[in-house]
Amino acid sequence: MRKQLKADSQACLEKEPSISDNEKLRIVLGTSEQFPSSPKSPRQGTELFSQQLFGTPHGISTEHLETAKSPEAVRIHPLSLFRKYWDFVVIICVIFSVVVLPFRAAFYWDYWDHGNNRGLLFHQIRDDWWIGPELIIDFVFIADILLNFQTGYIQEQVLIMDPANVRKHYLRTWFPIDLVAAFPMDLLLAGNRIDVLRLPRVLKVFCISRLPSFKAATRFALRLPFVSDMNQFHTRILRLLLTCFLWVHFDACLLYGAAVAQNYPDKNWVHQANLVGATTFHKYSWSILTSFGIMVTAGYGPYNPGTLADCWVVLFSQALGVAMFTLIGSMVTTILVHLNASSSEYASKMSALNQYMAHQKLPQDLRQRIRDSYEARWKAEKHFNEEEILEELPSSLRTEVCMHACAELVASVPFFEDAEEGFVTSLVTLLHPQVHLKGDLVCREGEIAREMYFIKSGTVQVQLHDRPVTLLKKGSYFGEIGLLRTARRNASVRAMTDCDLFVLTKEGFDEVMKEYPQMSKAMDLVAEHRIRALHKSSAWLKDHHETEADDSKRLDHAREVAANEEHEGMIEEDPDDLETGPNGGPDLLHFHPDSHPHSYQRPQHSLENDWGSGMLPGRSRPGRRSLLGHGDDD
């Protein structure tokens, strides 16, 4: 995978990639629509979506130029900004029609029985304001049919813009449904004095045949920023609630519409509920109650069916209720499974981890440290596999995601300031995150070096022979000496706080340095400087350790002499060497080693200068700050 990531990053950095490398769609025929090439174009948002199909921005531009060469192609690109906004308008009209038209057909049926359907269209609009929006929707649907004949489509990652193919595809798919939904019933029946208009007007309800276009509406909504950023649990709950509302709404309109179609027979539930002559809101509320009662209970709801037509309507409502609750049950089960998937996986892995630690008979303190480390990593990385996710992305998006994830690191590491863009891009695609808790040993002195580390956040301590040498913070890096020299670690590094690190393996390191030898030489200079600083630190620690051993022997000897003198009652304190303790005896805790001729003072200033030139945060060699930066040692 690392080789693939590196190849992808290098391909994205080429200035003039070939068309074959960038085109992800095979263009059958072009479009004569001209697309602006300015980066400030309002189509920028659409092109970000198009990039997922065409591969890279260069591939999109190539596709635009190629499709513009065909004068016989249809004129509307399926991913154009115009088509995007037009689809949004159509979706609003579909939602209005699906909700309002069944309501109109059921609860405003009486209006058309009293002669209000006669007269000029202007008079009808004046008497019934619903007609105006319905006429506008009719015109929108008719215009949508015409535009669909001039809009290309994408099939199996192939852009089709040929007029003949576009017509055949549309006639075989959406055209029959769109034609029924767009039939201008209100316009054709305007001014008609025929009293039998119920059945033709009921045909308007066939606009709900556009209900399958809700799938397209869902796809469009998911591309909106505020929807795509929503939690998947919230979107599923919202979809479940909307589904329940639509089903109950349709059934309520059906129940009342069946009663109205029978002219309110005496045994009908409308008479039983005393709804004849009631307000529309009162009728709709009782219809919702009756429909919901039939769908959720095993009986007939609040009222028994009084006619044969009512029996069939109630039977249909019960079947609809069974189907609805089956769907709701499956959706709720799916939601609960996905809601607890992460917790269940975490509990399963923790159980396996506890069994393993018990089998190995690990001490309790080590077990707790392992649990804490696993919990911290789980919170940081959750249950997804980052490598699998990146591998499924197109090369351009994969590189962009890696650059975004490491943007803070790249900005904080001075080593990257003057580095080539290709080097930085190739490097970040090979990094993977790693979490270390306070007290964790990141790398151990003497072990084989297989990784180098970049500190994203936190503080680590470099140690020689278990003695602290220096601290490294955000923007520092360490571990490159072992990779450059193919040697063992010459120092240990311990996390002093919770740390977020980025790790580069030896294989990835060698691969990048092979392609960028000048950066390898620069890092080699850093390693040389750090090795010299480590040698100075090691020599000082060795000398200091010997001095401390001599001081310890002298203190033991002084303690023995003092004890003998006290025992003989002959103690004579030397104020230069010993202080009086709380009991009148020698205070060995405050013994002054400066009086000893072999006392040794640590050359702190000199050591930090030597180390800081290659490793301390904020220090650098003169003239190579951008290369040395915040580095450290292995």
Image: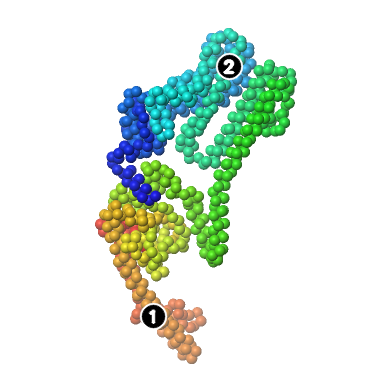
Q: Residue at x 33, y 40 (%)?
A: 21
Q: CA distance from mark 2 to mark 1?
A: 108 Å
Q: Residue at x 64, y 21 (%)?
A: 257
| Quadrant location of the C terminus in the rendered image | bottom left
Please tell me whether mark 2 sits on a helix, a strand or a loop. Answer: helix
Q: Amino acid at mark 2?
A: Arg
Q: Residue at x 35, y 35 (%)?
A: 60
Circle number at residue 201: 2
Q: Residue at x 62, y 17 (%)?
A: 109
Can residue 285 be seen by looking at this rendering?
A: no
State the image coordinates of residue 106 (x, y, percent, origin top left).
62, 21
Q: Amino acid at mark 1?
A: Asp
Circle number at residue 550: 1
Q: Quadrant of residue 30?
A: top left
Task: Check disc 2: other Cα within 10 Å, few if <14, some if 14-19, many if 20+.
Answer: some
State the image coordinates of residue 185 (x, y, percent, origin top left).
54, 16
Q: Quadrant of residue 490?
A: bottom left
Q: How is the image coloured?
A: rainbow
State the image coordinates of residue 47 (x, y, percent, origin top left).
38, 34
Circle number at residue 634: none
Please tell me whether mark 1 sits on a helix, a strand or a loop. Answer: helix
Side of 161 relative to 523 (left or right) = right
Pair 2/1: label in front:
2
Task: Point out the tag, 2 or 1, that comes first from the N-terminus.
Answer: 2
